[in-house]
Image (tube, grey):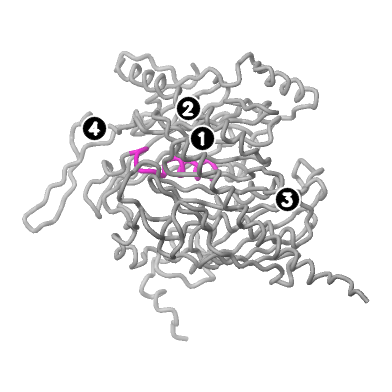
């Protein structure tokens, strides 16, 4: 039988140095997207005026979101969220019996989160194997969701949350948190509150709410002070912050103002999520007809 | 993470103590435990430091290698972090047990250093697009007694201060080919500017107050902590909420303010100490691991 994988011939050293998934056809080990070499100047975005997608700067102008529950029938609960071009879906399985029995605390249930990027979701192709960035995001998702879930009601059991990013156009973590809490609610898991996520990107004196991928990865040409990203996960009816993460360089006042802006952004999202949830409940258990 | 069992009565004792600004070991709420720093402890590294904070012990080694710059930033070198939780620290880390904590710590370190000023990456460039210095910062946990983040960040700052990168010369021949020449003199080195390297302050929320440098017992009483990395100027380069609980927005603002204050105060004595140790030169008495 002729060899039908041409790069297995061209690159005989493939899969020798790193443990890789041999079941999938991969490109050569060292290959880079041509866009990396092309768009050196594209990364600089203007720091005033309207944003590329027509939204306002320095205002809580989040992208309109589209959310829907129950798109995966096999899962206990599921949700899909779309904000601009950021598209992700989340499935919740469980509560089911804990896999590892050696965990010390049996009085509480266990929440496991797994967040993955589809290889084609970003500008550059990713790998199918979970990288350290994905692991970090999974952990952030876990820490943001855990305070909201009544885990003490599910002793000896685990609840699995899987998030798949289909298209990454910025603010992935914030939308993943929102989507996952909606999926948990759809699965009928008891929760104290919904969890909403919002992120901002600070660029000198101005900021953008719910940044797109380009805005997230742009390097500013103006000042180097106060550059950074911030993501907040918020429980709206309890007024509690369950997740907070920032990087870059910010002074204290900017950070504090940023957190407040993010909370405001979460409140903007709240009615949309509530509506999606009531719609899902109505569909699952239609109200008795008045006759 | 290494955990200890704390009974209900002990918890109440710790909580009441912290409420009255008096902790179990006699410290106030914003005091650190006794800290010891020694640099240049491993001769095979380009820079190393050992830090003990209470019973937490961390060893950091920095190795400089020549690598290829990242295509996105051809005129900069880069820094890689790796945290190893050895089974020496606690039996829980045996096998793959420490992996999760290790990735969490190293991912946070990448965030802490994800800005333009912490380390001058441009100074690590040898020839743009071709060669650059790659600093491998390897962190080894020798003992865990709470507050790993702070100890690690101080150790990294000390190790980077201690790092000596050999001077290289680039000579071009007639045909335009470039050659890298390493200086013959082992003392002909470049030092890094560590002025802007941030220190991490972990604030543990215990009851209605927060404490700095929590021991394992105090950590067991808290539901959530906030990590803040602060430079000597008071710029915040990273914040992150860790732990299973949520925090009130107001208490987050309070903790940020306290973290900034504590972190800022940490830098001056640390730099003074490092410079003092450096000025001793060969007359310095080495303490090593048994001191």
Residue tagged by mark 2? B263
x and y percent of residue B277 in the render?
35, 18
Secondary structure under the numbered disc 2 in the rendered image: helix
Using the image, tell me which numbered label, if any, was put on residue B5: none
The label nearer to you, 3 versus 2, is: 3
Q: In terms of secondary structure, where does tag 3 sit? A: loop
Would residue B174 be counted in the magenta stretch?
no
Place of residue A109 in the rendered image (x, y in percent of width and height, measured from the top left):
77, 48
Q: Which residues are magenta?
A: B103-119
Q: Nearer the viewer, mark 4 or mark 3?
A: 3
SS category of the residue bearing label 4: strand
Q: Which residue is mark 1?
A: B228
Q: Which mark is residue B189?
A: 4
Q: Is A193 positioned to the left or the right of B138 in the image?
A: right
Circle 3 chain: A
Marks 2 and 4, how far apart in space? 30 Å
In front here: A25 or A251?
A251
């Amino acid at each position: 039988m002729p060899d039908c994988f041409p790069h297995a011939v061209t690159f005989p050293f493939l899969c020798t140095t790193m443990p890789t998934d041999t079941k999938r056809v991969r490109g050569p080990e060292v290959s880079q997207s041509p866009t990396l070499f092309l768009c050196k100047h594209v990364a600089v975005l203007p720091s005033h005026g309207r944003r590329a997608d027509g939204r306002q700067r320095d205002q809580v102008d989040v992208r309109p979101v589209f959310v829907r529950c129950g798109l995966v029938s096999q899962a206990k609960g599921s949700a899909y969220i779309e904000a601009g071009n950021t598209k992700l879906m989340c499935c919740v399985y469980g509560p089911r019996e804990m896999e590892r029995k050696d965990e010390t605390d049996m009085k509480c249930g266990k929440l496991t989160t797994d967040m993955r990027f589809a290889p084609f979701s970003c500008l550059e192709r990713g790998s199918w194997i979970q990288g350290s960035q994905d692991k970090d995001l999974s952990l952030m998702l876990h820490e943001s969701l855990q305070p909201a879930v009544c885990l003490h009601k599910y002793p000896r059991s685990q609840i699995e949350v899987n998030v798949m990013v289909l298209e990454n156009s910025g603010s992935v973590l914030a939308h993943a948190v929102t989507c996952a809490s909606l999926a948990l609610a759809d699965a009928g898991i008891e929760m104290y509150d919904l969890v909403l996520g919002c992120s901002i990107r600070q660029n000198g004196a101005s900021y953008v709410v719910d940044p797109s991928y380009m805005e997230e990865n742009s390097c500013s040409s103006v000042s180097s002070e106060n550059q950074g990203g911030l993501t907040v996960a918020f429980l709206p009816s309890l007024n509690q912050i369950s997740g907070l993460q920032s990087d870059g360089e910010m002074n204290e006042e900017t950070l504090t103002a940023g957190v407040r802006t993010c909370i405001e952004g979460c409140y903007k999202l709240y009615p949309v999520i509530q509506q999606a949830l009531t719609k899902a409940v109505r569909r699952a258990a239609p109200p008795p007809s008045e006759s | 993470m290494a955990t200890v069992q704390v009974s209900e009565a002990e918890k109440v004792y710790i909580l009441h103590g912290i409420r009255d600004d008096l902790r179990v070991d006699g410290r106030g709420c914003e005091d650190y435990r006794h800290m010891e720093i020694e640099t240049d402890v491993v001769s095979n590294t380009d820079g190393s430091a050992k830090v003990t904070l209470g019973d937490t012990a961390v060893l950091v080694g920095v190795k400089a290698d020549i690598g290829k710059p990242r295509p996105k930033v051809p005129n900069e070198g880069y820094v890689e972090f790796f945290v190893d939780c050895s089974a020496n620290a606690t039996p829980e880390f045996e096998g793959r047990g420490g992996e999760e904590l290790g990735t969490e710590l190293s991912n946070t370190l990448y965030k802490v250093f994800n800005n333009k000023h912490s380390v001058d990456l441009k100074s690590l460039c040898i020839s743009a697009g071709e060669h650059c210095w790659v600093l491998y910062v390897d962190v080894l946990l020798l003992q865990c007694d709470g507050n790993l983040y702070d100890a690690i960040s101080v150790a990294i700052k000390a190790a980077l201060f201690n790092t000596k990168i050999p001077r290289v010369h680039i000579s071009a021949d007639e045909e335009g080919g470039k050659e890298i020449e390493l200086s013959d003199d082992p003392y002909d080195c470049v030092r890094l500017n560590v002025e802007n390297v941030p220190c991490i302050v972990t604030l543990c929320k215990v009851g209605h107050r927060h404490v700095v440098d929590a021991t394992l017992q105090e950590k067991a009483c808290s539901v959530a902590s906030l990590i803040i990395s602060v430079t000597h100027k008071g710029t915040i380069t990273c914040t992150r909420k860790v732990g299973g609980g949520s925090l009130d927005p107001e208490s987050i603002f309070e903790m940020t303010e306290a973290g900034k204050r504590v972190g800022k105060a940490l830098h001056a004595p640390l730099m003074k100490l490092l410079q003092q140790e450096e000025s001793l030169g060969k007359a310095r008495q080495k303490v090593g691991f048994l001191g």
